[in-house]
Amino acid sequence: MPDPSESLPPKAARILAAAGELLLARGSKGVTIADVARKGHIGKGTVYLYWKTKEDLLLDLLCRDFLALADEVISAVAANHELIRPSRLCPNLLHVAAAHPYVLAVRSNDAELLGVLTDDARSATLLDALGPDAMVRRILPIWRTYDLARTDWSVADQALAVDSLFSGFVMVAGGCSARQVEDPDRVFAASFTALLGPERAAPEQVEAAAAEAVRALGEQSAVVRGLLSQPAASTD
């Protein structure tokens, strides 16, 4: 998982890194600001210079994990436009998301890890903006526009079907069923093709779809950045 403290002032970065280690080890209920300060070798008061509450601090961890996931997808699609194809993007997104524990925790409503953050409206905003399922739903109209998905269904019906298929694969990825198949990615890809139809896009359509998807995910990343707490001016 990319460093969630990237681009922060050094002290804030240490605080966030310490909080991340403690959260994964103990869950939200087992983490206090005092624990974070001790692990980060920093004064407790300094933590409050950057985050007003423990929940704000932990929410920043979640936000940065969602942003890191989006950045990986955006960078990959921008570098290789062919990745925008449903048969390639969906299996790729499953693999990439698996390396983001906070994304998975929010998606599964993991109360043991997240505590009261499961009921925080900001967590729902995160999931709706940059959750793996939300990314697929947001890109679906782009696929339809550029001959990468069938258009004989309504968008709403197709979105429900795609959502159900993607969610099912999230549940079984890495499980016994997937391990019994020699190439589960091939099955994932074929399933999305069977649902969405053949990818008839010409090269220029693939390029346009990739560019539009990058823009769409960039806009959603801006929404998530708006949820980040604003640290006080650095005193480092």
Image: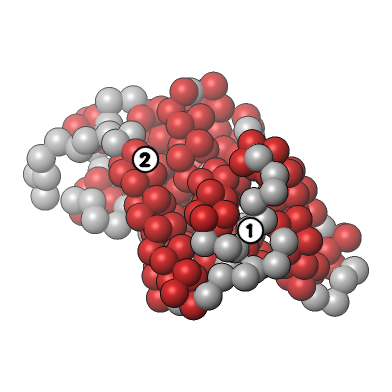
- Residue 7 placement (x, y as % from top left): 24, 56
Q: Which residue is mark 1?
A: 149
Using a 10 Å C-alpha cutoff, classify the residue at mark 2 as few (fewer than 14 neighbours), some (14 to 19) or many (20 or more): many
Near-viewer residue (219 or 202): 202
- Label 2 vs 1, first from the N-terminus: 1
Residue at image location 48% in from the left, 23% down from the top: 120
- Residue 132 placement (x, y as % from top left): 57, 49
Near-viewer residue (53 or 74): 74
Q: Secondary structure at mark 2?
A: helix
Indicate the amino acid at tag 1: Ala
Q: Secondary structure at mark 1?
A: loop
Using a 10 Å C-alpha cutoff, classify the residue at mark 1 as few (fewer than 14 neighbours), some (14 to 19) or many (20 or more): many
- Residue 92 placement (x, y as % from top left): 60, 66
Q: Which residue is mark 2?
A: 224
201 to 20, vertically: above or below = below
- The reply to whether callout 2 and callout 1 are in contact (CB within 8 Å) is no
Q: Is residue 78 left or right of residue 117?
A: left
Q: How many marks?
A: 2
Mark sitting on residue 104: none
Furthest residue in direction front, as rendered: 152
Scheme of image coloration: secondary structure
Locate residue 122: give its quadrant.
top left
193 to 219, vertically: above or below = below
Residue at image location 41% in from the left, 66% down from the top: 208
